[in-house]
Image (cartoon, helix red, strand yellow):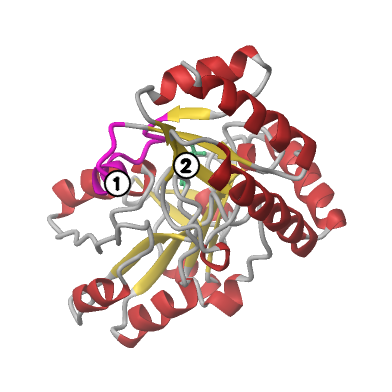
Amino acid sequence: MSLMEHHSNIVPWEIISKISGFTIKYAKVNDNGTLDYEDFESKVSSKTKLVSLSHVSNVSGVINDVKRIAQVAHEHDALVFVDGAQSVPHMPVDVRDLDADFLAFSGHKMLGPTGIGALYGKKHLLETMEPFQGGGEMIKEVSFNQKTERVGIEWNDPPWKFEAGTPNICGSAALMEAINYLENIGMSEVLKYEKMLTEYATKTMQNCCTKLMLYGTSDHSLKCGIMPFGIAGLSSHDVALFLDNYGIMIRSGFHCAQPLHQIFKLQSSARASFYIYNTREEIDRFIEVLKEIEQF
Ligand SMILES: Cc1ncc(COP(=O)(O)O)c(C=O)c1O
């Protein structure tokens, strides 16, 4: 694990560790929001069973070198789970190239609906795993033995083994539409467009206001289109409310990543982020409003 994780990649592991009794180690994060790879490598050992890390931080936009992380983990016979919630919507992600054992992403961050996502797992691993939920569809056969008066169950093959009950049919149809839409544009094009917007926003934001503080690294090669910032003397919620009055939506708070805010020594941050529907003109308008906010 690392200290830049979204709470959803911390809390479930902490809950299971209380039941199973395993130890969790958190790799450090540098002041600029990048992963401390040395610290990470020092914490992986022959005792490590699983390394679980985000591909892209939802606070800083920092892209982790998952290939390097997977290589280190595999050298120690550990498995790798990648939180792809912020990478899959924004860039080409090839699980084979990354050598990720598992990777999860959410529909609502990539033009799809809420309440649905996907988990990729290497087939040979999924085949050896027990189901985590029981119900219809996830079995091949349920048979009652007259002699023993016991029920015998044969699990279905993956992925059905892990899809108990009637699935979210509407959600999955909508998510598939979103994926097809993005694939028609091309994920490389999505990444290229977002990089252009991020570079433009960084350049204009850096010089626009004296009270504006940009958090995390400004090295574009290390990050994607997420810009955490603050305005001295104002809470992130006030900044968000002000922008909202002008029809500009950003997020404020700790973005479900409190440990990373502890590293940044912040209670909260404002976060602008870009996607394929944003434009340079919108960034110009955003900057104009930031200049107005600064007058307060
Ligand atoms: C990096 C990251 N991981 C995980 C999540 C959790 O996604 P969900 O709310 O769909 O479970 C988010 C959502 O904010 C995220 O940004």
**Relative to 47, residue 4 above or below:** above
Circle on res. 214? none
Q: Which residue is rendered at x = 70% and y = 43% of the image? A: 275
Residue at image x 36%, y 49%?
Answer: 9
The amino acid at mark 2 is Pro
- Left or right side of 113 for 46: left
Left or right: 80 in relation to 16: right
Instruction: Indicate whether residue 130 is drawn in magenta.
Output: no
Picture coordinates of residue 181 (x, y %)? 83, 47
Read off the residue under disc 2: 228
The total number of labels drawn is 2
- Disc 1 marks which residue? 264
**Where is residue 217 drawn, in percent x and y?**
44, 58
Q: Sequence order check: which comes first, mark 2 or mark 1?
A: 2
Tell me the element at label 1. loop
- Tell me the residue at 70%/49% (across/down): 197
The one nearer the camera, 273 or 178, is 273
Q: Position of residue 240 (x, y in %)?
A: 51, 22
Tell me the magenta residue range.
253-267
For the residue pair 163 and 24, the one nearer the viewer reads as: 24
**Circle 2 sits in a helix, a strand or a loop, which is it?**
strand
Residue placed farthest to the right in the image? Answer: 184
The alpha-carbon separation of the residues under discs 2 and 1 comes to 11 Å
Residue displayed at 34% across by 78% down: 73
